[in-house]
């Protein structure tokens, strides 16, 4: 039952960040201060005296005080213009609250686990010996860690028509992911779509590797090619920094939604 592929889910979730990113018109900053407050055991975000709302018009709230502070800080960091495409924590929270594709936790978990069939680090080059050595040196330690950490036996492959993941291993990983709440699962899928890798996403959220390292590993072939042929510094660096920003938000989001915390009212000046 867990392993049924659902076309609707894949269509809704496929593509980097499609479930999360909406087209926001850039707006001028209309508030002076941001803050958080406690209400019925939850945290709301304030912009001056106004409470923040989601794109669907629902009251914006989270259940973690540190997450609320982080979201308020995102809003406080906006200057003359509000650039919501850069506010990853806010976007993640909006997705959880509005659930635009009406997905269940199991829907999303199935998507994540089935993504392993095409996970970046499980398919290694066989036409370039030097690149293959590079991949073995950089990717294999993460694969080994993943197998030990989750008690699975994922296999590397050089052929896309051979699945590197058994049904038993998928079932094991589904059980693990289902132990997280709905919000955290949304964070995981944001990371998977960012890196094109379940393995690297979990390695980052489990703090086996840093977000910076995870992004580099997800771009290993590009890093290899630029090391050989050179690179356009500004374009390469901007893309890398954007991916690092997205993944860092994922690590924080999963962590904050997996912790309980005491509540107190705070304001950010």
Image: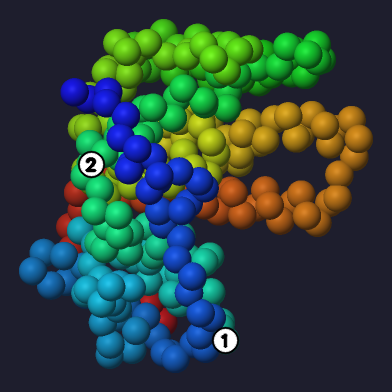
- The image position of residue 144, as x and y in percent, is 50, 12
User: Residue at the location (40% across, 62% down)?
Assistant: 91
User: According to the image, label 1 marks what residue?
Assistant: 80
The tag on residue 207 is none
| Camera-side mark, 2 or 1 | 2
In this view, the residue farthest toward the right is 229
| 142 up-or-down from 156: above or below | below
Q: What element does badge 2 sit on?
A: helix
User: Residue at the location (46% across, 22% down)?
Assistant: 117
Q: Nearer the viewer, residue 99 or 85?
A: 99
The tag on residue 105 is 2
- The image position of residue 193, as x and y in percent, is 49, 42
Q: Is residue 201 visible?
A: yes
Q: Please give left or right for residue 237 compared with residue 61 in the image.
A: right
Could you tell me how far apart the alpha carbons at marks 2 and 1 are, in whole angstroms?
37 Å
Q: Nearer the viewer, residue 93 or 1?
A: 1
Q: Please give left or right for residue 11 compared with residue 179 in the image.
A: right
- The image position of residue 136, as x and y in percent, is 67, 13
Q: Residue 2's image quarter?
A: top left
User: Residue at the location (40% across, 53% down)?
Assistant: 19
Q: Residue 75's image quarter?
A: bottom left
| 247 up-or-down from 77: above or below | above
User: Residue at the location (42% across, 37% down)?
Assistant: 205
Q: Please give left or right for residue 69 compared with residue 125 in the image.
A: left
| 134 up-or-down from 203: above or below | above
The colour scheme used to paint the residues is rainbow
């Amino acid at each position: 039952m867990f392993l049924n592929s659902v076309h609707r889910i894949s269509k809704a979730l496929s593509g980097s960040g499609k479930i999360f990113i909406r087209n926001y018109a850039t707006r001028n900053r209309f508030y002076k201060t941001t803050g958080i407050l406690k209400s019925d055991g939850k945290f709301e975000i304030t912009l001056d005296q106004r409470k923040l709302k989601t794109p669907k018009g629902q009251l914006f709230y989270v259940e973690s005080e540190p997450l609320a502070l982080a979201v308020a800080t995102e809003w406080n960091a906006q200057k003359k213009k509000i650039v919501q495409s850069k506010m990853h924590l806010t976007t993640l929270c909006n997705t959880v609250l509005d659930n635009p594709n009406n997905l269940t936790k199991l829907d999303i978990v199935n998507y994540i686990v089935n993504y392993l069939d095409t996970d970046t680090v499980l398919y290694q080059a066989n036409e370039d010996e030097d690149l293959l050595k590079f991949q073995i040196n950089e990717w294999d330690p993460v694969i080994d860690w993943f197998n030990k950490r989750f008690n699975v036996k994922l296999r590397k492959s050089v052929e896309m028509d051979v699945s590197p993941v058994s049904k038993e291993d998928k079932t094991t990983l589904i059980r693990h992911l289902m132990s997280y709440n709905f919000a955290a699962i949304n964070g995981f899928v944001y990371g998977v779509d960012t890196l094109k890798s379940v393995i690297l996403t979990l390695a980052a959220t489990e703090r086996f590797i840093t977000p910076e390292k995870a992004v580099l590993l997800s771009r290993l072939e590009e890093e290899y090619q630029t090391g050989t042929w050179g690179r356009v510094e500004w374009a390469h660096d901007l893309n890398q920094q954007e991916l690092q920003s997205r993944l860092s938000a994922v690590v924080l989001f999963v962590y904050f939604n997996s912790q309980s915390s005491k509540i107190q009212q705070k304001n950010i000046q």
